[in-house]
Image (tube, coloured by chain):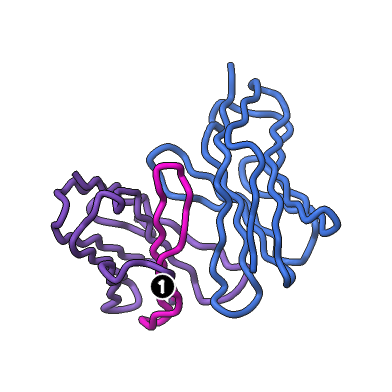
Amino acid sequence: AQSVTQLGSHVSVSEGALVLLRCNYSSSVPPYLFWYVQYPNQGLQLLLKYTSAATLVKGINGFEAEFKKSETSFHLTKPSAHMSDAAEYFCAVSGASGTYKYIFGTGTRLKVLA
Amino acid sequence: DTAVSQTPKYLVTQMGNDKSIKCEQNLGHDTMYWYKQDSKKFLKIMFSYNNKELIINETVPNRFSPKSPDKAHLNLHINSLELGDSAVYFCASSPRLAGGIEQFFGPGTRLTVL
C-alpha cells in the first residue's frame, strides 16, 4: 500500500525567505511522486513530478524537489518566497502498475508574510 | 479555452434531494476522475474512467453514480443527498491510464447540503 505524509499543515515564511515543505512517502514499489498547488477557490495545478529520472526535479515558479530514497522523502523547496506563493500544497504518490491512482497527502497551507 | 470544466461551480441543496455535477475536458484525454475534497482539504479519489470504462470505484456509497457518455465527459449523479456529502468535488483528466502522468483538474464544484 502507498501513503504520503506531509509534516506541518501550516507553514509561514517571510517574503524572500526559503520555502521548505516536507513530504514523506511509503511505497512497496518504486513510486511516482508529485507536488500540486491549489490557489484559493481553484483546482490543483502540477508544480513538478518525479518519475525515476533525475532525483532533483525542477518545476514551475522556481520550485524544486529532491527525491531521497534512503529517507523516503520528496521535500519541496524554493529559495525565495513570493507573496504569490501563498496557497495549499499537496504531495501525491502513485504506483507504476495497476490503477495508477493518486494518493494525496493532507496538504500544507503556505502563508507568506510581508 | 478551459481545459477541464465543471458545472455548476456552486450547488446548495436540501437533504434528500438528487443532484448532478457535469464535467467536460477538451484535452482529448482518455482518462477522467472524480475526487472529493472535504472541509479539511483532504483529497480522495472516488472514481476513475478510462475510455468510458470504470477503472476505480473507491468505497463510495452507491448513492453516487458516475456516468461517462463519451471520453470527453464524466458526470456525477448523487441521490438522496446527506449532510456529509457537503464538500468540493473535483473532476480531473489525464492523457492515458499510466504511472507518472499529470492529472489536469477542473475548478471544482462546492456542494453544500442543508
Q: Position of residue A75 (x, y in %)?
A: 72, 46
Q: Position of residue A49 (x, y in %)?
A: 65, 58
Magenta stretch in the rendered image: B31-56
Q: Is residue A29 left or right of residue B59?
A: right
Kindly identify which residue carries mark 1. B28
Q: Colour of chain B?
A: purple
Crowd around label 1: few <14 · some 14–19 · many ≥20 (10 Å): few
Please identify the quarter of the rendering in which residue A15 is found.
Answer: top right
Point out the residue furthest to the top here.
Answer: A114
At x 29%, y 53%, the residue is B85
Q: Is residue B36 left or right of residue B110?
A: right
Circle 1: element type: loop
Three-letter amino acid code of the residue under disc 1: Gly
Residue A51 colored magenta? no
Residue B54 colored magenta? yes
Please identify the quarter of the rendering in which residue A31 is found.
Answer: bottom right
Q: Disc 1 is attached to a residue of which chain?
A: B
Q: Is residue A50 left or right of residue A101?
A: right
Please identify the quarter of the rendering in which residue A22 is found.
Answer: top right
Q: Colour of chain A?
A: blue
